[in-house]
Image (cartoon, rainbow, N blue to C red):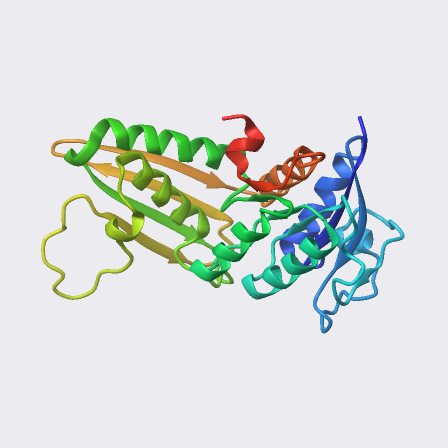
Amino acid sequence: MAVQEIGISGAGGRMGRMLVQAVQAAQDRCALRAASERPDSEWVGQDVGEVAGVGRLGIRIDGGSERLFAPGRVVIDFTQPQATLAHLATAVAVGAPMVIGTTGFDAEGRGAIERAAGRIPIVFAPNFSIGVNLMFRVAADVARVLEESYDIEIIEAHHRHKVDAPSGTALGLGRAIAQAVGRPLEEMAIYGREGLTGARPPRAIGFATVRGGDIVGDHTVLFAGEGERLEITHRASSRMTFAKGAVRAAIWLSGRPAGLYDMGDVLGF
């Protein structure tokens, strides 16, 4: 089996360091070839292995993405929407597949990813945890069975540094549930409540957001009915679960045709 070359954007960040560790743990299937950071990052010029705590690898972190992309090399990107979209344009020009874990895209950004997927293979997912992707499927199945007789709330909690809300995973859960009941999420979502909101509208999906401390990621889907409630919860205790899933997706992309894929495709759901 050929070893898949990988490049990592944002390699000095918390998720970037985990990705380096995950690539090194899968050396029989993939190999790190390049790493980048913002030009003003303190990590620029340093050995990416030493930054990630896996020892010297002989790969310096570049202050830009010029050397990150190469034909056939999968670039894993967990950065910010503006940076990811800039990287995406380079990926299309070079012919490099991408694994995108960045969240917070608006409709225009998601459209740009969809258009790029007509030229290169892309795995784009709100969450790369295997457990969370099982949760997407289970929550959709439950919503389909319970139909309109249960109220649906999605509660998510993350660390104080997370900049987007609700989380991409919470929105992914909402989309999976909305699709299961045959309605657009935009018609069902309630993103905040304050003051005299009136009675809860039927067939709504409510979102609640918690930010604090170093919470890696907690997600609960609450189905509340008359006389009972059902809760489906996933709690992540380490970012490594996301990093391992992203590396698995990068390896899976090897030789795939252009197209937009998600973790359901990678896991064979």
Q: In the figure, 218 relative to 80: above or below? A: above
- Residue beneath the point at 10% across and 58% down: 198
- Residue beneath the point at 50% across and 55% down: 103
Residue 204 lies, in percent from the top left, at 21, 47
Residue 261 is left or right of residue 227, and the answer is: right
Q: Hey, which residue is sitting farthest right in the picture?
A: 58
Q: Nearer the viewer, residue 9 or 52?
A: 9
Q: How many marks?
A: 0
Q: Residue 231 sits in which quadrant?
A: top left
Q: In the figure, 256 relative to 99: above or below? A: above
Residue 221 is left or right of residue 169, and the answer is: left
Split into 4 quadrants, where in the image is the N terminus? Answer: top right
Q: In the figure, 226 relative to 92: above or below? A: above
Q: Residue 244 sits in which quadrant?
A: top right
Q: In the figure, 86 relative to 72: above or below? A: below
Residue 72 lies, in percent from the top left, at 76, 43
Residue 215 is left or right of residue 71, and the answer is: left
Q: Hey, which residue is sitting farthest front in the picture?
A: 118
Residue 35 is left or right of residue 217, and the answer is: right
Residue 37 lies, in percent from the top left, at 72, 63
- Residue beneath the point at 28% across and 39% down: 222
Residue 166 lies, in percent from the top left, at 39, 55
